[in-house]
Image: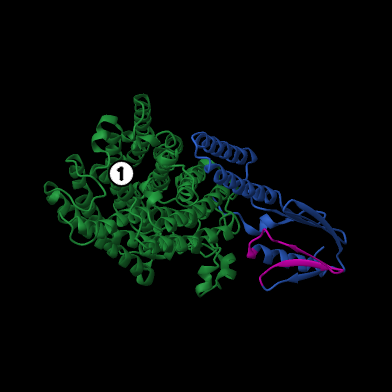
């Protein structure tokens, strides 16, 4: 086992420019989730139905509530599983793509107008023309600091 | 085992978390898995003391034949709430505490999947515990119905029964939320490379336990709700006079109750499966077979419930089925015991306190399993049903099984949790005192049961006097030994020697290899890569 080097995993440089890509950490295997949820739901229904046939029907609503709760939790992690953020410098353009809870949004800023905003809690955002986009949410604090440093250099024109 | 001074890990990225919240709100509003795990463990110890005091009241009354100390109604109430508090308030939360502390660290996750829900699942416990304790002060006293809450006793008991039902509902909600959190955390938050079959066995055992909990909790919730509606809303689920069936309650309860035994035992297997390899300095023997054996035990646990009710009346074919199905559980359990022993075989063994408790678990749990096999035989069970043999059997499973394993786990991970080392000499004293007094308390109860002493009675025939006296002395010794445990833990936290990052050289899961001691408040914000 080895520790992942923080910086290398966050900043990707290619010959033409700079791209930052990070996605929500997820080990979700859809088939496994479906298997766990499906088998649990089916099993709960069989148990509740069996007891209902013996006259103890009040188990059914509890089984229903529980399956619903587990299903909701599964949906929530599914929605988050594909979340990512991508930031790319292309000449003077900054392209940002964010997918959060299943909703994808795209932003395009001009490098001359974009400003870096760092919060007291260590958050990192780019702001331009009244629009603010937070990035680095899937990084640790050290990673966000590195990202902020890199972006500051590129916005100031010290790095191209 | 000698302490290994591993190089201090670089955790500069955790610097911003050095200013963690302080004061009471750190605990009330905590969404941190380590804080919540700590609260679970302290809560379970408090409940262990409350349930223990109840046990000592029971054993005080049984010290001599005749009624000396408490009234029979109060005695019955003590047997009821001792069971409920120990099962739902002490042992289950203790292992949820372990799960909270360890699962994220062992799979390389920064926290649980739903941290706010995690907070809620813990904070549901204290009100439920208060309800169980408050039931003692309800008009008519606590419900003397046994922890199984059998109808028609439960449908006729006083207002304490309503408080108890409410408490069970709350505890059930807490368990369900905890289980959903554990399932989603393990499925979704494993570090890159941490495949399911690479997870430490403790995580596997909790994944299977959470599955069991989700499957059986609605059954318990339904059972106590039907008891409630029978009591207050004119239904007749369990009232024979109204066309209901009290035996139906027994089927429902034990359909929950037998898996519940494994809900307690399986995480204990997980803890022991971490401790034994560490002190044998060998990998766990037969990892895959351990996973499959655990899953087999969980599946079989749904098929054997009626072995608790052979005397309630059932066709001989059903008795035969439940007997054979129960005996079948010995196979996967045997696989596990074999694997633990094989792990130690030719290992470089040392016997620090965690290993001693793990070995105590192995020896005594096997004995408890063996008496379980004896009880699974229908003609034998018909003789021994509701005798002290059954009491001895399940205390060997619950105390020597689950509790000893919990002690093993606490001593094993205390250096990681606190950053300090406990006093090894006192730890060993704790083990030997617990082992001796446990057997003094419960081994003689086998003889009482074989001689025909029924359980749940405050008075008994003179022929049982000596063994009861021995058992009561053992119980007080066992209870006092646990105060030594409290002292050891407090002394460790306040003035223990600094622990190494990898205190046990044979421990190889992520919390030992990748994190310093004590584990930082936030860990694995950047997931480790497991190869």
Using the rendered view, name the quadrant where residue B45 is placed.
bottom left
Q: Position of residue B388 (x, y in %)?
A: 23, 45
| Left or right, B143 with reference to B521 | left
Nearest the viewer among B69 and B357 is B69
Q: Is residue A138 magenta?
A: yes
**Residue at the farthest top position:** B317
Nearest the viewer among B452 and B329 is B452
Q: Is residue B470 above or below residue B495?
A: above
Instruction: Read off the residue under disc 1.
Output: B365
Bounds of the magenta span? A121-142
> Looking at the image, can residue B199 be seen?
no
Q: Colour of chain A?
A: blue
User: What residue lies at 52% left-to-right and 74% top-to-bottom?
Assistant: B22
Using the rendered view, name the quadrant where residue B328 is placed.
top left
> Looking at the image, can residue B88 be seen?
yes
Q: Colour of chain B?
A: green
Using the rendered view, name the quadrant where residue B448 is placed.
top left
């Amino acid at each position: 086992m080895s520790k992942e080097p923080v910086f290398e995993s966050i900043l990707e440089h290619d010959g033409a420019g700079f791209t930052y890509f990070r996605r929500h950490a997820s080990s979700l295997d859809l088939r496994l989730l479906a298997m766990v949820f499906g088998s649990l739901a089916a099993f709960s229904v069989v148990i509740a139905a069996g007891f209902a046939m013996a006259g103890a029907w009040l188990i059914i609503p509890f089984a229903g509530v529980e399956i619903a709760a587990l299903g909701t939790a599964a949906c929530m992690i599914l929605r988050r599983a594909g979340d990512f953020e991508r930031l790319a410098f292309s000449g003077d353009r900054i392209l940002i793509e964010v997918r959060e809870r299943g909703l994808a949004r795209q932003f395009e800023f001009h490098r001359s107008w974009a400003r870096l905003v760092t919060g007291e809690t260590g958050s990192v955002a780019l702001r331009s023309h009244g629009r603010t986009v937070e990035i680095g949410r899937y990084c640790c604090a050290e990673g966000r600091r590195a990202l902020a440093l890199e972006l500051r250099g590129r916005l100031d024109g010290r790095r191209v | 085992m000698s302490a290994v001074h591993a190089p201090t890990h670089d955790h500069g990225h955790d610097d911003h978390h050095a200013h963690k919240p302080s004061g009471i709100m750190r605990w009330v509003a905590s969404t941190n898995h380590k804080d919540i795990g700590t609260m679970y463990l302290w809560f379970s110890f408090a409940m262990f003391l409350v349930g223990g005091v109840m046990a000592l009241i029971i054993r005080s009354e049984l010290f001599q034949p005749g009624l000396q100390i408490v009234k029979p109604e109060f005695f019955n109430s003590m047997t009821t709430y001792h069971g409920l508090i120990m099962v739902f308030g002490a042992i289950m939360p203790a292992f949820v505490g372990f799960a909270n502390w360890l699962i994220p660290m062992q799979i390389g996750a920064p926290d649980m999947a739903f941290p706010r829900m995690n907070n809620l699942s813990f904070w549901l416990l204290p009100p439920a515990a208060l309800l169980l304790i408050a039931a003692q002060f309800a008009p008519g006293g606590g419900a003397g119905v046994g922890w199984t809450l059998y109808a028609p006793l439960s449908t006729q008991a006083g207002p304490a029964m309503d408080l108890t039902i409410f408490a069970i509902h709350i505890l059930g909600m807490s368990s369900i939320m905890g289980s959903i959190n554990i399932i989603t955390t393990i499925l979704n938050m494993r570090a890159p490379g941490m495949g399911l079959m690479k997870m430490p066995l403790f995580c596997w055992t909790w994944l299977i336990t959470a599955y069991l909990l989700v499957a059986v909790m609605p059954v318990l919730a339904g059972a106590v709700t039907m008891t409630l509606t029978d009591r207050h809303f004119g239904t007749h689920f369990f009232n024979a006079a109204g066309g209901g069936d009290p035996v139906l309650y027994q089927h429902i309860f034990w359909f929950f109750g037998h898996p519940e035994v494994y809900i307690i035992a399986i995480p204990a297997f997980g803890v022991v499966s971490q401790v034994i390899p560490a002190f044998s300095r060998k990998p766990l023997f037969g990892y895959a077979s351990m996973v499959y054996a655990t899953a087999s035990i969980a599946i079989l646990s749904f098929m054997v419930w009626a072995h608790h009710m052979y005397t309630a009346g059932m066709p001989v074919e059903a008795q035969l089925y439940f007997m054979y199905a129960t005996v079948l559980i010995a196979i996967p359990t045997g696989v596990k015991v074999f694997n633990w022993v094989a792990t130690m075989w030719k290992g470089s063994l040392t016997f620090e306190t965690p290993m001693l408790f793990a070995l105590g678990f192995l020896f005594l749990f096997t004995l408890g399993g063996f008496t379980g096999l004896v009880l699974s035989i229908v003609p034998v069970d018909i003789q021994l049903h509701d005798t002290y043999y059954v009491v001895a059997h399940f205390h060997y499973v619950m105390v020597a099984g689950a509790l000893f394993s919990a002690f093993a786990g606490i001593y094993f991970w205390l250096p990681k949790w606190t950053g300090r080392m406990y006093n090894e000499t006192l730890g060993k004293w704790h083990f030997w005192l617990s082992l001796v007094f446990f057997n003094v308390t419960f081994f003689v109860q086998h003889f009482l049961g074989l001689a025909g002493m029924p359980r749940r009675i405050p008075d008994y025939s003179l022929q049982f006097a000596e063994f009861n006296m021995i058992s009561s002395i053992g119980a007080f010794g066992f209870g006092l030994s646990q105060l030594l445990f409290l002292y050891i833990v407090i002394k460790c936290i306040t003035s223990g020697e600094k622990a190494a990052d990898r205190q046990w050289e044979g421990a190889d899961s992520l919390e030992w290899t990748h994190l310093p001691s004590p584990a930082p408040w936030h860990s694995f914000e950047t997931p480790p890569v497991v190869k």
